[in-house]
Image (spheres, rainbow, N blue to C red):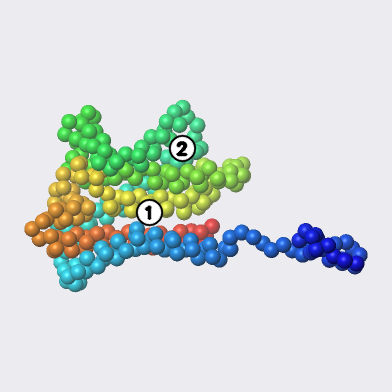
């Protein structure tokens, strides 16, 4: 018996198996190797993150401690600077808390409610994302300025700062909670309602635990946006020291000091480092809280 040397490769792989018919040898798998692809991708990601985030942050930290710890401490403990940092962090926390509550309510109404104009309402929520920050500040100034059409002037007030920050951070919690609400299993809620549970009890015992990670994420995003905001609040704040001057305005003012550029740049970097540290602490605390919520769920 001879073998046809011109037979296709598949035929050469056929081997009799006890008369049960031919058996094919498994073909070699083709395509990209996951190990090599993931390694390359990881390298690209690390390089990209280093260029955009890690190296710039390291440069700011290095500049902040350029004159040593004493120079850093002096920069952030100056009375006007310390007051601006306290105001900025306090406002950012307030914005995060308010958005956690109101953003969840808005998302609930959009998902569970049916009312005329819901589509327009959905579009309006995203407007703060689309507006440049200086335009958002102009919008607030037009409404709450000295010639306010509604007779309410918030220029140079902390209330004006809070309202403006709430405006620019409105979409964060709404857009993080909405997808979770859309995917919630309604059967458990319907079963609880059939057993006589009230709507508040159903929300607190069934829906809220599932929504909590998204609510926390939206609150953190609101905090991070508020703590570094500048363009939207610069017009309505009037930059009054010890009253409405925020940390971003202090940083900008320091960088405009051409007479003592080196010291001013170091001070600006020190203030920026405090804001960065505050954001990092909040992110760590929220991550711990989310893990605990997930374990309980």
For marks 2 and 1, give the one nearer the viewer: 1
Q: Nearer the viewer, residue 205 or 67?
A: 67
The residue shown at (80%, 63%) is 5
Badge 2 density bin: few <14, some 14–19, many ≥20, Cα 10 Å: some
The residue shown at (11%, 56%) is 258
Which residue appears farthest toward the left when viewing the image? Answer: 259
Quadrant for the N terminus, please. Answer: bottom right
Q: Are the residues at dot 2 and dot 1 in contact (C-beta closer than 8 Å)?
A: no
Q: Nearer the viewer, residue 108 or 72?
A: 72
Q: Nearer the viewer, residue 118 or 231?
A: 231
Residue tagged 1: 220
Q: Nearer the viewer, residue 165 or 187?
A: 165
Residue 51 rendering spot, x and y as whole percentages: 35, 60
Q: Is residue 243 above or below residue 137?
A: below
User: What secondary structure is found at the residue carrying circle 1?
Assistant: helix
Q: Is residue 20 above or below residue 136?
A: below
Relative side of 100 to 56, left or right: right
| Disc on the earlier residue, 2 or 1 | 2
Q: Is residue 163 visible?
A: no
How much space separates mark 2 and mark 1, taking CA atoms?
Answer: 22 Å
Residue tagged 2: 109
Residue 17 rendering spot, x and y as whole percentages: 87, 67
Relative side of 269 to 257, left or right: right
User: What secondary structure is found at the residue carrying circle 2?
Assistant: helix
Q: Quadrant of residue 36?
A: bottom right
Q: Is residue 191 visible?
A: yes
The residue shown at (24%, 33%) is 143
> Which dot marks residue 232?
none
Relative side of 203 to 13, left or right: left
């Amino acid at each position: 018996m001879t073998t046809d040397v011109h037979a296709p490769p598949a035929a050469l792989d056929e081997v009799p198996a006890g008369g049960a018919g031919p058996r094919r040898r498994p073909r070699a798998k083709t395509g990209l190797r996951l190990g090599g692809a993931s390694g390359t991708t990881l390298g690209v990601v690390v390089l990209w993150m280093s260029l955009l985030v890690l190296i710039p942050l390291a440069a700011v930290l290095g500049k902040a401690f350029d004159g040593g710890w004493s120079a850093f401490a002096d920069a952030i403990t100056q009375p006007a600077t310390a007051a601006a940092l306290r105001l900025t962090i306090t406002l950012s926390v307030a914005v995060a808390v308010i958005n956690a509550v109101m953003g969840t309510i808005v998302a609930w109404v959009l998902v569970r409610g049916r009312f005329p104009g819901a589509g327009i309402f959905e579009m309006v929520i995203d407007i703060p994302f689309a507006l440049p920050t200086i335009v958002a500040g102009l919008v607030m100034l037009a409404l709450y300025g000295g010639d306010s059409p509604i007779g309410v002037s918030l220029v140079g007030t902390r209330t004006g700062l809070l309202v403006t920050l709430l405006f620019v951070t409105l979409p964060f919690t709404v857009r993080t909670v909405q997808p979770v609400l859309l995917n919630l299993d309604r059967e458990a809620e319907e079963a609880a309602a059939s057993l006589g549970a009230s709507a508040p009890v159903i929300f607190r015992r069934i829906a809220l635990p599932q929504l909590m990670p998204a609510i926390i994420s939206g609150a953190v995003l609101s905090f991070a946006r508020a703590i570094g905001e500048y363009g939207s609040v610069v017009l309505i704040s009037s930059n009054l020291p010890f009253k409405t001057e925020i940390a971003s305005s202090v940083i900008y003012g320091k960088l405009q000091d051409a007479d003592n550029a080196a010291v001013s740049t170091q001070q600006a970097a020190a203030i920026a480092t405090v804001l960065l540290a505050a954001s990092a602490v909040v992110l760590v605390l929220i991550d711990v809280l989310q893990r605990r919520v997930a374990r309980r769920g």
